[in-house]
Image: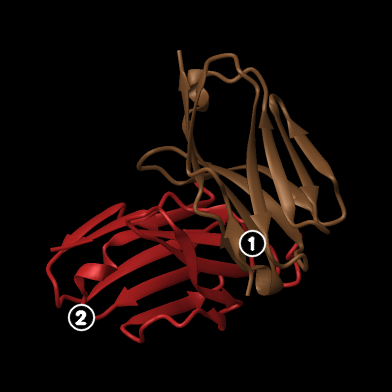
Chain colours: A brown, B red
Amino acid sequence: KQEVTQIPAALSVPEGENLVLNCSFTDSAIYNLQWFRQDPGKGLTSLLLIQSSQREQTSGRLNASLDKSSGRSTLYIAASQPGDSATYLCATTGANSKLTFGKGITLSVRP
Amino acid sequence: DTAVSQTPKYLVTQMGNDKSIKCEQNLGHDTMYWYKQDSKKFLKIMFSYNNKELIINETVPNRFSPKSPDKAHLNLHINSLELGDSAVYFCASIGGLAGSYNEQFFGPGTRLTVL
């Protein structure tokens, strides 16, 4: 059974700082890994999807990496801004396109 | 032009009532899902349907009954609502069951509060 872990549960950084959010998973038999953003009281916004054959994906100030063999993924956010404050969730895709989510990291970027 | 839509957005009801949440996707996807996000914000899959056929049922109480009238719709009916059912329910869809390499698209969520 897949387990996805995100530590720490919360993170507070000053504006402008580069930061890394970590995600680990127990079963490396995944199709892909997705990073989502969730604002308070809102739905999920997909940020990046990394296929199992890929090592990383980039979108703007975001870069996600995947090391399937070690069961790890990171989301790198460059030059953080207060608008980046949200909860970031990672999720692995397994059989039947079933997503298994981590509990998320709540990021606060201080002006 | 919403890709995955859910109604209602908010639902407040009394314990013991029966209620339904509706989901529709206009993406032409074959597979749809229901997820539950509890008070601790943990998201967990409940059901998945592919072309109106149930393919995932994650040990959800049988008070929850998904219904898929066609592949663009997946509704969730809940009988005898309990306090613990209070959560945000998200619908999602993906193109093709074998399309596990594809991105899942999520609806905006339905916040259910049971009093």
The number of numbered discs placed on residues in the rendered structure image is: 2
Residue B29: image x %, image y %? 63, 63
Question: Is disc 1 on the same chain as disc 2?
Answer: yes
Q: Can I make out residue B72 in this image?
A: no
Residue type marked 2: Ser
Q: Can I make out residue A1 in this image?
A: yes
Residue A63: image x %, image y %? 73, 33
Q: Residue at x 60, y 59 (%)?
A: A4
Q: Secondary structure at mark 1?
A: strand
Q: Residue at x 64, y 43 (%)?
A: A22
> Quick check: A6 left or right of B13?
right
- Looking at the rendered image, the quarter that the C terminus of chain B falls into is bottom left
Q: Nearer the viewer, residue A38 or B65?
A: A38
Q: Earlier in the sequence, mark 2 or mark 1?
A: 2
Mark 1 — residue?
B94
Residue type marked 1: Ile
> Quick check: B75 left or right of A91?
left
Using a 10 Å C-alpha cutoff, classify the residue at mark 2 as few (fewer than 14 neighbours), some (14 to 19) or many (20 or more): few
Residue A78: image x %, image y %? 67, 22
Q: Residue at x 33, y 66 (%)?
A: B21
Q: Secondary structure at mark 2?
A: loop
> Quick check: A83 left or right of B78?
right
Q: Nearer the viewer, residue A78 or B61?
A: A78
Q: Nearer the viewer, residue A15 or B10?
A: A15
Residue A107: image x %, image y %? 49, 33
Q: Is residue B40 above or below residue A96?
A: above
Real-space Cα separation, disc 2 to disc 1, in angstroms: 30 Å
Q: Residue at x 63, y 75 (%)?
A: A1
Label 2 resides on the chain identified as: B
Marker disc for residue B80: 2
